Image (tube, helix red, strand yellow):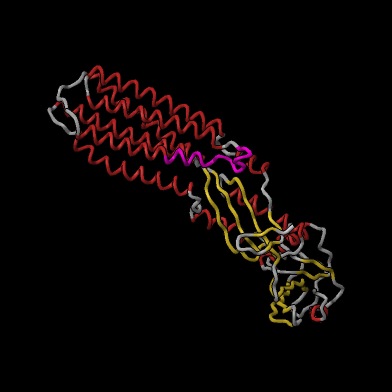
Amino acid sequence: MAHSAPGGRNRLSVLDYSPSRASSAREEHAHSEMDLERVGVYSLLVNLGLSVAKLALGAVSGSLALTADGIHSLVDVIASLAVLAGLRLSTRRTHTFPYGLYKVENLVEVVVALLIFVAGYEIIRQAFGGQVTLMPPPYYVVAGVVAAIVGPLLFSRYELEIGRATGSPSLLADSRHFQIDVLASSIVLVAIVGSYFGLTLDRYAALAVVGFIVWSGWELLRDGMRVLLDASIEPETIERAERILAQAPAVSTVHWVTGRNSGRYRFLEAEVTLRTRDLEMAHRASEEMEAELRREIPNLDRVIIHYEPEERPIRRLAVPLADMAGSLAPKFGEAPYFALVDLQTAEHRVLREEIASNPFATLERGRGLRVAEWLVAQKVDWLLSREEVAGKAPGYVLANGGVIMRRTDARHLQDVLAQEMGGAGG
């Protein structure tokens, strides 16, 4: 059954979505969904520990900065809860949401971005507002603040590594939020150390942090909103998909490739022209293209390939030759030469004729397969040879590349061309 692609033109067929293939691709990922949820739980526990520790140290020392930083960490607890909820909900499919709830992660990304802005406001407020005490706190408070810096810094690096490996926007956003927490705690440390020397350095240190906070929050907000509004995936991924499709033996033209992100997963759609009219061969070629796309591009949930048969006024014929004079070779793979002839099928006219040396004629093993691959790369449309090639290993390679194979009893290239000019080539 023909399907309509964007643009209104009918296509020969469409590669339907296979839940089993998409599911197996995700299961082969280095980090399972359970691993991601576990990281989310770790994030929640770290933030809970930080908020309790900071509030306790603030109460003992009487430090306004520490108390404000403890309140800031409570905001981080809310962010961690949002990340954990997003990770748990994002992979669920329902009748209402058949494409999954992947975008919950991007919604979480936007929420975390807004919380980063809140954190930035809190840092500015604690540095420039309120009363600053010059009373040096006990040394164990300094040690506690240092631990509150080192712990989140190490965890943010760990979370960033997992987020990059899985492409999870929630973990990447939460990792950045931990970096903001490290900066906030660093301001507190500067203020505490400055108090031993009668200085109020926290006001100046805050100025260096504000710019990073605004940039970091805006980047997260922008990326999250792009996905929520179905903006295209990154150009690098589109270009990689175009290259993969263009290199497929059965593809003559790649018309367009588009896609979108949803959470950490990608959806790709493409339109190509195939060098075959055979439905079974076209479907097999599209499955091979999908498999190659999944191997090269991580986190592909759905791939849809619209394909149509090629309508070409010019077809390329390949004939194995025994010599430059045009005698046909008895064996396909051992032929020292190949005639490559471009024919204008409507007028049965030869446009171009070339005799090329077989680059694999001297190989001891596998030369038939290599020759078949070479002919496919030469965009050959059909092959006429004295040896029956169909049904053999080289024949499968040629068939997958959309090459039509026929056996001929002709002894000379001119006899073959005479037959084709009479319409035998179809």
The answer to whether residue 422 is above or below residue 148 is below
Q: Residue extending furthest front? A: 96
Residue 415 is at least partly visible in this image: no
| Residue 51 falls left or right of residue 366 | left
| Residue 353 falls left or right of residue 68 | right
Q: Position of residue 308 (x, y in %)?
A: 69, 63
> Relative to the observer, which residue lies in front, 335 or 82?
82
The quarter of the rendered structure image containing the C terminus is bottom right
Residue at the spot 22% in from the left edge and 25% down from the top edge: 64
Q: Position of residue 348 (x, y in %)?
A: 76, 81
| Residue 304 falls left or right of residue 114 | right
Q: Position of residue 48 (x, y in %)?
A: 39, 23
Place residue 354 in its image quadrant. bottom right
Residue 237 on the magenta segment: no
Residue 106 on the magenta segment: yes
Place residue 403 in its image quadrant. bottom right
Q: Position of residue 81 (x, y in %)?
A: 45, 29
Residue at the spot 72% in from the left edge and 55% down from the top edge: 283
> Relative to the observer, which residue lies in front, 77 or 367?
77
Place residue 55 in its image quadrant. top left
The quarter of the rendered structure image containing the N terminus is bottom right
Residue 109 is at least partly visible in this image: yes
Residue at the spot 27% in from the left edge and 24% down from the top edge: 67
| Residue 20 falls left or right of residue 128 | right
The answer to whether residue 201 is above or below residue 9 is above
For the record, the magenta segment spans: 93-110
Q: Residue extending furthest right? A: 409
